[in-house]
Amino acid sequence: MKIGFIIVLLVALAANVYVLWHVYQVLPLPTWGKWTVVVLMAAALVMMFTGIFGAFDRMPLWLASATYDISTSWLIVFLYLLIAFLVLDLGRLVHLVPREWLHSNAWTAGTITALVAGLLIYGNIHYHNKVREPLTIHTGKQLQSPVKVVMLSDLHLGYHNRKAEWQRWVKMINAEKPDLILVAGDIIDGYVRPLLEEDMAADFRQFNAPVVACLGNHEYITGIDKSLDFYKQAGITLLRDSTVTLGDLVIAGRDDRSNFKRKSVKQLIAGVDKGKFTILLDHQPYHLEEAQQAGIDFQLSGHTHEGQVWPMSLMVHKMYENAWGYCKKGDTQYYVSSGLGIWGGKYRIGTRSEYIVATIQN
């Protein structure tokens, strides 16, 4: 595990050096100007790592938010710069790209800057365009009437998704007039401080329907005790390897995979009324067959973000049986949400931020 982490760290460091070296080479600036740009880019990376180790919580809230946004946005900039320079270097190897294109070239630097900036602007606008995904779930089990459920995952409330934005989401969800709201984990981004200082728990209590949720891996990153305290303040019904019956529905919530001792799906639903429609909340969509084998009617998951930005989305689809959207295995239906919020910089490129409005009916 430690060796694997060290290898990943060294590869990431090498990739950053590769990008920064090419930035230095391509910029048509005097030496001091080149170094200024490179140092600022390197500082963005350093800011992110210092934040992970607690620096954000020691800053004023506005400064922590700005630092978070800048440092995590660098990851997206770095990704597309890496792709651009790899393509250009490949072009040089096959003699399609002249060497001059990569050395103090205003056209190359300007084109790359414009393309990356355009992607970021598009990605940010697209992120804020929340997609309403309607879903009809048919069941042969008895329902007194259709049930309208708003399904969410990956809110990632914190330094970047602040109170004002969260309040807009609450209004948007309340406008659906749901009977129930389900959240498949990662309500908290990783830092509980902004949620407490801005009293975001009060906004959860503004929902016009019960909120039922399971934990995600980011609640463990935050600190499980801090996360549990917030869930309690917010009035959320937290299902941590437990179930609750609400009318004609049984909701089962698994603890996140971060807890290696969590229950299996079969253990979780042992003893529940199988005559009722059963929904499983399981943050990470691994081993979907477990829900099918246990006789679950519907599973809601999240976690993947569908990669957030292209081409990470291609990798995520290789990692999971179903990285996003609806699927069915036997009699069990599934939906893996790409998330309403996001981790890091607010950019959706080739993916979307969504909420599901599901109607369960006969």
Image (tube, rainbow, N blue to C red):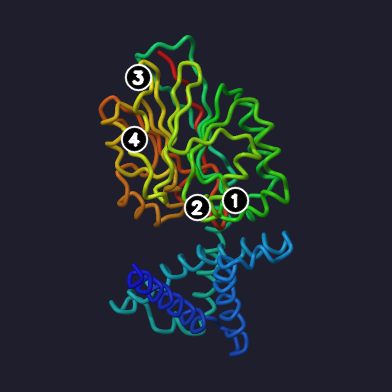
Amino acid marked by disc 2: Tyr
Quadrant in the rendering for residue 164: top right
Quarter occupied by the C terminus: top left
The amino acid pointed to by label 4 is: Val
The CA span between labels 2 and 4 is 20 Å
Mark 3 or mark 4: whose residue is earlier in sequence: 4
**Residue drawn where x is 62% and y is 52% of the image:** 192
Q: CA distance from mark 2 to mark 3?
A: 31 Å
Disc 3 to disc 4, how far (Cα)? 14 Å
Density class for disc 2 (Cα within 10 Å; few <14, some 14-19, many ≥20) is many
Residue where numbered disc 3 is placed: 274
Q: Which mark is residue 220?
A: 2
Residue 38 in the image: above or below residue 249: below
Asked whether the beta carbons under mark 1 and mark 4 sit within 8 Å of each other, the answer is: no
Quadrant of the image containing the N terminus: bottom left
What residue is drawn where x is 68% and y is 63%?
Answer: 64
* Image: 193 above or below 141: below
| Distance (Cα) linking label 1 and label 4 | 26 Å
Within 10 Å of disc 3 (Cα), the crowding (few <14, some 14-19, many 20+) is some
**Kind of residue at disc 3:** Lys
**C-alpha gap between disc 1 and disc 3:** 35 Å
Residue bearing mark 4: 265
Which badge, 2 or 4, is on the more N-terminal residue? 2
Secondary structure found at label 3: loop
Label 1 belongs to which residue?
226
Q: Is residue 4 visible?
A: yes
Earlier sequence position, callout 2 versus callout 3: 2
Which residue shows up at 60% across the image and 50% down it?
226
The x, y position of residue 58, in whole percent, is: 69, 66
